[in-house]
Amino acid sequence: MCGYGTLEELLEVITWAQLGIHDKPVGLLNVDGYYNSLLSFIDKAVEEGFISPKTRHIIVSAPTPKDFVKKMEEYSPQHERVASKLSWAYEQIG
């Protein structure tokens, strides 16, 4: 069963891209428009200035697997990393 935790995890992975922890797209296979409301909410946040238009492009969505795979393969980060000077390397202790 999915819930708020699943939504939080999705947004966390998007945030990781924004912070520069990874440079991959975050994909939503939007079958039958399932994610339309979420994407509209995010687009409204861009319109209102809460989310940068360039970071909006971290999220890749498509209605079919074929289109989805194509968009994921064509993805190139357009945003400036918020924390680009931080090192996310793991340091082993001991």
Image (cartoon, rainbow, N blue to C red):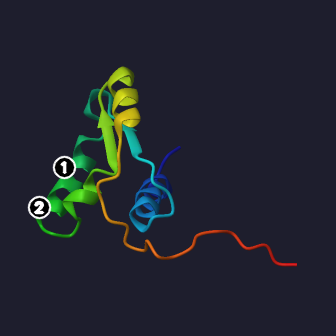
Seen in the picture, residue 69 relative to 4 is either above or below; the reply is above
As helix, strand or loop, the secondary structure at mark 1 comes to: helix
Seen in the picture, residue 90 relative to 23 is either above or below; the reply is below
Q: Nearer the viewer, residue 63 or 54?
A: 54
As helix, strand or loop, the secondary structure at mark 2 comes to: helix
Q: Nearer the viewer, residue 57 or 29?
A: 57
Q: Residue at 33% across / 33% down in the picture?
A: 71
Which residue is the extreme one toward the right? 94
Which residue is the extreme one toward the left? 47
Q: Residue 68 shows which numbered tag?
A: none
Of the two numbered discs 2 and 1 on the same chain, state the one appearing first in sequence: 1
Q: Amino acid at mark 2?
A: Glu
Q: Position of residue 14 (x, y in %)?
A: 41, 57
Q: Nearer the viewer, residue 34 or 11?
A: 11
Q: Amino acid at mark 1?
A: Ser
Seen in the picture, residue 92 relative to 7 is either above or below; the reply is below
Q: CA distance from mark 2 to mark 1?
A: 10 Å
Q: Residues within 10 Å of mark 1 (few under 14, many from 20)?
A: few
Q: Position of residue 8 (x, y in %)?
A: 45, 60
From the image, tell me which residue sits under label 1.
40
| Residue 78 lies in quadrant | bottom left
From the image, tell me which residue sits under label 2.
47
| Residue 91 lies in quadrant | bottom right
Which residue is the extreme one toward the front? 85
Q: Position of residue 94 (x, y in %)?
A: 88, 78
Q: Is residue 75 left or right of residue 13?
A: left
Q: Position of residue 45 (x, y in %)?
A: 19, 63
Q: Please tell me whether mark 2 or mark 1 is closer to you in this view.
A: 2
- Whether the residues at callouts 2 and 1 have beta carbons within 8 Å, the answer is no
Q: Residue at 11% across / 61% down in the picture?
A: 47
Q: Nearer the viewer, residue 80 or 12?
A: 80
